[in-house]
Amino acid sequence: MRVTTWIAYVCLISSIATGQGLTSVCHQFNGQSLNPGLPSIPFAGSGTLDLLVTAPVGGAFNGVSLYLNGFGAAQKATLALYASAGGVATGSPITSADSQLSGGWCTFQTPEVAVVAGVPYVLRFSGAVPGTVLSVAYDPAGSTAIPYALVCGASFTACNFFPSSGALPVVLRWRSSACVNTALADAAYVGWTCPSAPSFWATPNLNVTAPVLGTQAFATWAVAQAGDFHLFWSIGHAASSVPLGPPACLSTFLDLASVQLLAGLGLEPLLTTPSPGFFASGAFLLPNDPALTGQKVAVQGVFTSPSSPAQFSRSAVLTLGY
């Protein structure tokens, strides 16, 4: 079966795709065992959640990943990195990024900036469009309490159960180009489905579970109509967004040379499965091979239906690991 054999080609042809535009996880705060039902801090996108985080490594900062228990109908959230003065954000953002929301790990990939190890910085999270509801997980068994400041946002009652400030073991991953390899399995979502999309259902909303070697990884998607969902992949990823349009907003992070080679081997798409509409999923098997730790693989979904043009999801860059 293709889903059990595709990864064997990684070792043979990984040299064809060496894009380095995305970075690895340097450090994970809390949540080493991500059990279902972790409690969370809910707040409206019109509010903010500030986290005071001490940089675990110095050098080039490229973003963070938050673990989300859920999200509202809106599709985007924003991260901004600030200098800290007495534990409070000061000045203008040092760097910032938007991310399409997902359940599980949600990655914000920022332009690279220099940070100093051991120095506290403020990470500010908010909704990028009206209607966003964020639900940021924390781990009661976590060993690192992260100071926070919370502004609930308009008309969001659930948030009001939390004190406006305190410290909680928020589940967070720090990303940096200083860490070219990591043992942590990671799914980083990149690119953005066209912002003119009128609703959550207008484009396939792809999510992929962390690619833990020796397990099945699951790809899930949401789309309003019935059809077929195809998951394409590449060994490595493009160094930056590759245009696919029109429209101009349509792009990919797949390494197209790798896609062509894999297609010639009969390994594209990685999987195809019928989608009855709303939500559907498919799985692919990862071997328990430590030699693949740190290998990056890009995936992107294409939804086809006789009643509409092809629709493209965002891309995900998977770091294989444990």
Image (cartoon, grey):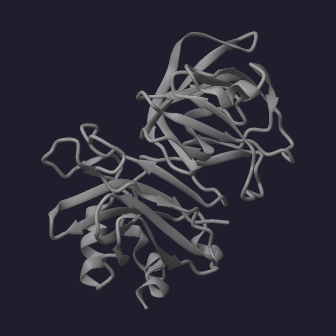
**Considering the image in quadrants, where does the N terminus appear?**
bottom left
x then y, percent, for residue 237: 38, 58
- For image coordinates 54% across by 46% down, the residue present is 106
> Considering depth in this image, is 13 or 3 the residue closer to the camera?
3
> Considering depth in this image, is 43 or 21 the residue closer to the camera?
43
Establish if 237 lies above or below 98.
Answer: below
Q: Is residue 293 left or right of residue 242?
A: right
Establish if 194 lies above or below 86.
Answer: below
**Considering the image in quadrants, where does the C terminus appear?**
bottom right
Residue 116's quadrant in the figure?
Answer: top right
- For image coordinates 26% across by 63% down, the residue present is 256
Q: Is residue 225 left or right of residue 5?
A: left
> Considering depth in this image, is 197 or 217 the residue closer to the camera?
197
Establish if 89 lies above or below 96.
Answer: above
- For image coordinates 19% across by 52% down, the residue present is 244
Q: How many marks?
A: 0
- For image coordinates 79% across by 38% down, the residue present is 169
Q: Is residue 83 left or right of residue 226?
A: right
x then y, percent, for residue 120: 72, 22
x then y, percent, for residue 15: 40, 68
x then y, percent, for residue 184: 66, 58
Establish if 129 lies above or below 227.
Answer: above
